[in-house]
Image (tube, rainbow, N blue to C red):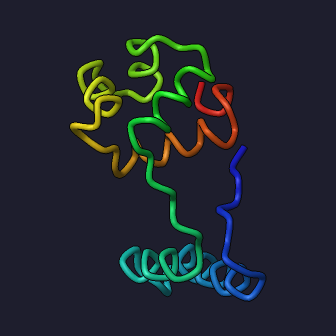
Amino acid sequence: MTTKPKSKSRIFEAVHETASDLQRLGFIDKRKMRKFDVLCLDPIPQYDSEKIRALRDHLQLSQSVFAAVLNTSLSTVRKWEVGDKHPSGPSLKLLNLLDRKGLEAVL
């Protein structure tokens, strides 16, 4: 099951849907589609060390299990929680998905 990304407004949602259809049909390349994503979709919030720790505690997961769920290393999760590193890219998206939908969404 796929979920629709949250858009900034109904107009942006219509623009993004049209662009997605054009990209699917081959009229827009991936690079241009990413520009529409940035323009139309809400950005993913940043997760600081406290927020990551609170999310892991809420899900009642150990650091090692949390790392396995996110397909990252234990040391990375530790560094996130200490504040030495910050999640980005796919890890940030997975954290947001876990936060919004729960553990069942990624398992």
25 left or right, relative to 89: right
Q: Quadrant of residue 98?
A: top right
Say which quadrant the N terminus sits in.
top right
In the rendered view, would you say 90 is above or below 14?
above
Task: Indicate the position of residue 52 as horizontal and vertical percent values.
Answer: 46, 34
Residue 30 lies, in percent from the top left, at 40, 74
Q: Quadrant of residue 48?
A: top left
Q: Is residue 97 above or below residue 76?
A: below
Q: Is residue 44 left or right of residue 102?
A: left
Locate the C terminus by quadrant. top right
Residue 27 position (above or below residue 30): below
Left or right? Give the position of 79 relative to 11: left
Q: Which residue is at a point 61% across and 39% down the rendered structure image?
A: 99
> Residue 78's x, y, as percent?
29, 23
The answer to whether residue 80 is left or right of residue 9 is left
Please report the residue visible at 25 percent of the width from the left and 29 percent of the height from the top.
79
Q: Where's residue 40, x and y in %?
A: 59, 80
**In front of the other: 67 or 35:** 67
Towards the viewer: 37 or 75: 75
Residue at point 24%, 40% (across, down): 85
Number of marks in the rendered image: 0
